Image (cartoon, helix red, strand yellow):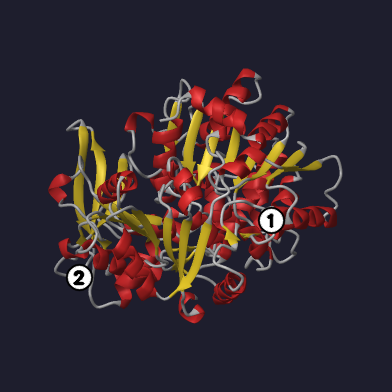
Amino acid sequence: MLSIDSIDRLVEQRVGLLKAIEAFEKGRNIVLIAPTGYGKTVLSRRLVRVARERGMASGLIHVVPYRALVRQIYLEKFKGACRSVGYQSLDDIDPENKSPYYLRELVVSTLDSFVYNLYRIPVAEMLKVVGGEYSLGHYYPVLASIYTSVVVFDEAHIYLGTDLKAGDEVERESLEFVVAALTSLAKLNVPVIVETATMHSDVIADIVRVMSASYRDLELIYVGGKGIQAQSIERRLQDLGAGSSKVKLNIVEDEEFYDEHSIKWITKLVDEELALKHARELCNNEPILIVRNTISRAIKTYRELTSVCNKATLIHSLLSNYDREWALKLAGDIIKSSGVIVSTQVIEAGVEVRARVLITDLAPIENLSQRAGRLCRGEKLGLCREDGAEVYIIRGDPEKLAEVYNGERVKAAMQLIGEELSRGEHRIDWRLLATKEQEKVSFTEILERSKPLRAIETDNALNNLYRIATSYLLSDATPKTLEKLLEGLRTSLTRTSLLVNVMVSPLKECPGNIEFVTIDASRLLGREVSRSGKCLEYDDLERPQIVFVYYSEDQDSFICRESSLNHSLRKLFSKVRDPSSFIKALVNESSIKTLQRVVGIYLKAKNRCYERGLGLML
């Protein structure tokens, strides 16, 4: 855990962070573009102190894309930072400090939770609001918290970038709702900071355009010197007419960081067999990070290496809450000694692996740079400067990889990387946003030559979704109005459809030690309907089993009740027209007709459907 003194020392060493604090003290909104490992996340600890001391805000909400990142930031970087620190995610990291209404000075929250809260569906009362009862929930308290706080969108490339996928599924729906959130917060004069390390200049310019709707001035701080990307950003801002005093571009050269992070990068495009042979040779001598694009491929790689490597762990989105915690703990042990960490792209944001060797599937440039950005942290930085950091990119068929990423962008990445590597394996710098050495090229220069898949088209007359979302946020409409809008548009607020919990522990463990996997509802149900090997538990009439956890006044305790749905899962799935109606459908199709005092709903998995350490077998 970082002390206040260590945070202050880090901030004083980072020119870009000092510039961000200066801009914040002047009342400006900020877009901070800085390399991985620069300290963007811990900046929030300093900003919340400044905000409270100067009466600028009552607290700070730090928004990140993944639950695992909430856990890491809360436990390792925020806990103890000030008098009142909390978190909000589905996980029970530290139950006493869970803060779904953001009633703490400093809160780290998942993006999903923040979006639901901002759109007046308080996550603490979601079952009431979307479950069938006519309840609006207590959304004014959480709105009051948001509107009187600084809001930091960390790792913004994940939800404002290009073509991120969740496991094997496409995440389609978040962009318009998150952009509408930026617009409304700007217009409501809420201090907003957007942070990223890997984003195309087109997307950066679009974010600036959206945030320019604020009464506040905006400062874009680019920590990398005036390289190719900085020049591109400057041109795009001029094209937008954003060169007025309202928007300031501050290009920062941090010589100390540049010298400290001038790593000897070694990049190779290799076949899978050669890459895994290299992992087997090194894994008992040092930590190795392997990132596969799909869960099935990650499991296959993990199984192949467990017989060779003394230590191995697997991290992906379909692990149970207990197994995920165990996997992260083992990853910490591997980092300190040796072994292999096999993961999907969930590791791209924020996690400090502190290894010097990466083996990764081919992916768009942004994803590759984020994966490489996990390397060479802490004590491994000196070793990387001396011995070099190795990045092995597994060649892949762009057509096959299109199931995970856009095929054209993967093909472009392979071609552009191949062109650079033809000039030498030391050619690409995966961390610095610009290089001073002519024989090297920053990943940002390659990124600028590959077009982003999606743009933030708020001015497009056809983008009714963005306009509706913005109008809703700036109105006093209730969440019931939003629910009807979402049903009509057949869409969802969050990056994926509604998340559901699947219980993988025996019912006798309920409610005290429930082990569960959180999964996208449409993904689970779609596969359950289409495949012969069922994962969920059914009764004799082939009706899915569901477990409700609720508070019993008679027993003055939480208890569990198992029930069967009234119809088959296929029939239930056919009735779910949009993700937000899933909970309502579960309740209406079960024998429980009210959600009063219900605190959890779980579909029940068969014992064989979950394999310890490997996850939900879909």
Name the spot of residue 293 as percent of width and height, x first: 42, 67
Task: List the residue tagged with mark 1.
Answer: 467
Task: List the residue tagged with mark 2.
Answer: 542
Marks 1 and 2, the one that precedes in the sequence: 1
* Number of marks present in the image shown: 2
Choose top left, top right, bottom left or bottom right for residue 531. bottom left
Tag in front: 1 or 2 = 1
**Mark 1: secondary structure:** helix
Task: Name the residue at 54% across, 66% down.
Answer: 425
State whether residue 221 appears in this view: yes
Name the spot of residue 23 as percent of width and height, x first: 72, 32
For this view, does 352 lie left or right of residue 314? Answer: right
Task: Name the residue at 46% across, 77% down.
Answer: 396
Looking at the picture, which amino acid does disc 1 mark? Answer: Arg
- Residue occupying the far top of the picture: 53
- Residue occupying the far front of the picture: 386
**Mark 2: secondary structure:** loop
Q: Is residue 557 above or below residue 584?
A: above
Q: Is residue 217 above or below residue 103?
A: below
Name the spot of residue 536 as percent of width and height, x first: 23, 64
Looking at the picture, which amino acid does disc 2 mark? Answer: Glu
Q: Is residue 373 above or below residue 461?
A: above
Q: Quick one: label 1, few (<14), some, or many (20+) residues within 10 Å?
A: some
Q: Quick one: label 2, few (<14), some, or many (20+) residues within 10 Å?
A: some
